[in-house]
Image (spheres, grey):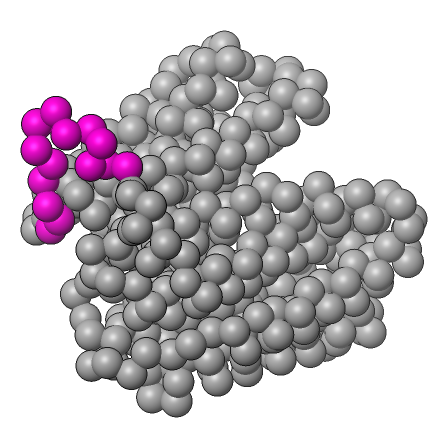
């Protein structure tokens, strides 16, 4: 799973940074269609998370992983071949379904392999290595596109997708196969839903929704504009800031998951939000590149803790036969926050204006993390082995 996840993230990283410029230049598309092409991946992925999570509780996961990798490979190849913007949008959306299947099922599968006393450590390790693959892909993306053209990124991405598919074939499936014609058993019953929607799951879903709004809206949308336009830092300088954030993210996943097994998930998660709020306040108060470096690392560390600990929290709180459905629910809120965040924070900047809108956005982001601290109090830890 770790090798397959790393390859999948690497394949996606090869395309993510260059996709919007590719659409703009190769298809001479207006900004609206560029936005539709970019957001279509995330919107469709969001809609696919819950159904895939439900299926993973009932169908052997190896089969779903194989189908998902075929979707990803097909999407990459069509993006390479097509000259039609609408075909490109559909292909990218199918790619989103393929990635949703891997990330949702991957979390569920790894969580099922270990008891809750070590689950946080191994979920954190799994996601940290995945993020390293994505980071390497994003780093290589610009160099490949600049030297050989945009479309070569899609060819290499599809080749890496085939390698990931080969790795997936070695994974042993789990789950209870459906009886032929038993479509109703795919849909969760009222009793299952009642048991699934416990206080911990609802709180974790809201926590990740708020965090993704802040992360994609503030750090993913406004931060690059703030750094390059308002502070006049170079693109290379911004790249270094992002690298520090990614390093913090990887560290947060590893250390957060391990510490949550030893000290308790709620305590570690609360500490992560304190670190995150401090980093945003620090970013709002400094215009120095040197001081921004540790603040970005702290921000990435906080996000790594959230991303590593909350899935373990959810896996602890639901029965094993409903774990895929729970992870699918969590990831749906996760993706939804990523869709809403850029609209919220860009609207805030437009309303308040430059430069005060940037400072206001940092403080609103910090307030959102403080709000999440209150949600952490609603979480209940399970002490079973």
The quarter of the rendered structure image containing the C terminus is: bottom left
Return the x and y of residue 366 as percentages of the image width and height. 71, 69
Vertical placement of 133 versus 51: above or below?
Answer: below
Can you name the residue that lies furthest to the bottom here?
Answer: 263
The quarter of the rendered structure image containing the N terminus is: bottom left
Q: Residue at x 22, y 45 (%)?
A: 56
Q: Residue at x 63, y 53 (%)?
A: 213
Vertical placement of 16 versus 182: above or below?
Answer: below
Using residue 157 as the reference point, say whether residue 149 is left or right of it. right
Using residue 179 as the reference point, say whether residue 279 is left or right of it. right
Return the x and y of residue 252 as percentages of the image width and height. 46, 74
Q: Residue at x 38, y 42 (%)?
A: 49
**Residue 346 seen in the current view:** yes
* Type of secondary structure dominating the magenta stretch: loop
Return the x and y of residue 262 as percentages of the image width and height. 33, 88
- For this rendering, which residue is in front, 282 or 261? 261
Can you name the residue that lies furthest to the front here?
Answer: 191
Asked if the stretch drawn in magenta spans residue 186, the answer is: yes
Asked if the stretch drawn in magenta spans residue 293, the answer is: no
**Residue 152 seen in the current view:** no
- For this rendering, which residue is in front, 208 or 252? 208
Range of magenta residues: 174-187
Using residue 196 as the reference point, say whether residue 300 is left or right of it. right
Among the 4 quarters of the image, the one containing residue 311? bottom left
Can you name the residue that lies furthest to the top here?
Answer: 84
């Amino acid at each position: 799973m770790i090798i397959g996840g790393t390859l999948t993230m690497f394949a996606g990283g090869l395309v993510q940074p260059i996709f919007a410029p590719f659409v703009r230049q190769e298809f001479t598309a207006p900004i609206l269609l560029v936005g539709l092409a970019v957001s279509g991946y995330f919107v469709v992925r969001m809609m696919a998370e819950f159904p895939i999570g439900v299926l993973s509780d009932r169908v052997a996961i190896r089969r779903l992983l194989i189908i998902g990798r075929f979707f990803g490979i097909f999407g990459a190849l069509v993006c390479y071949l097509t000259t039609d913007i609408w075909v490109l949008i559909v292909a990218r959306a199918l790619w989103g379904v393929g990635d949703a299947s891997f990330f949702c099922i991957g979390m569920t599968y790894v969580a099922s392999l270990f008891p809750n006393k070590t689950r946080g450590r191994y979920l954190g390790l799994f996601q940290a290595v995945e993020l390293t693959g994505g980071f390497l892909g994003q780093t290589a993306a610009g160099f490949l596109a600049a030297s050989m053209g945009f479309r070569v990124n899609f060819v290499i991405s599809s080749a890496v997708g085939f390698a990931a598919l080969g790795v997936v074939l070695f994974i042993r499936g789990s789950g209870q196969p459906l009886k032929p014609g038993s479509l109703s058993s795919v849909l969760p019953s009222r009793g299952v839903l009642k048991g699934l929607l416990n206080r911990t799951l609802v709180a974790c879903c809201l926590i990740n929704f708020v965090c993704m709004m802040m992360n994609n809206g503030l750090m993913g949308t406004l931060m690059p504009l703030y750094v390059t336009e308002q502070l006049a830092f170079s693109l290379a300088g911004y790249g270094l800031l992002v690298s520090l954030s990614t390093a913090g993210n990887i560290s947060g996943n590893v250390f957060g998951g391990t510490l949550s097994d030893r000290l308790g998930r709620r305590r570690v998660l609360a500490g992560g939000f304190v670190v995150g709020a401090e980093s945003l306040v620090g970013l709002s108060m400094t215009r120095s590149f040197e001081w921004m470096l540790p603040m970005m690392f702290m921000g990435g560390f906080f996000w790594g803790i959230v991303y590593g600990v909350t899935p373990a929290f959810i896996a602890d709180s639901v029965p094993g036969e409903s774990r895929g459905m729970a992870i699918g629910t969590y990831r749906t809120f996760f993706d939804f926050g990523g869709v809403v965040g850029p609209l919220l924070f860009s609207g805030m900047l437009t309303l308040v204006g430059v430069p005060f809108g940037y400072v206001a956005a940092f403080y609103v982001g910090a307030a959102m993390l403080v709000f999440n601290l209150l949600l952490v109090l609603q979480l209940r830890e399970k002490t079973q082995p």
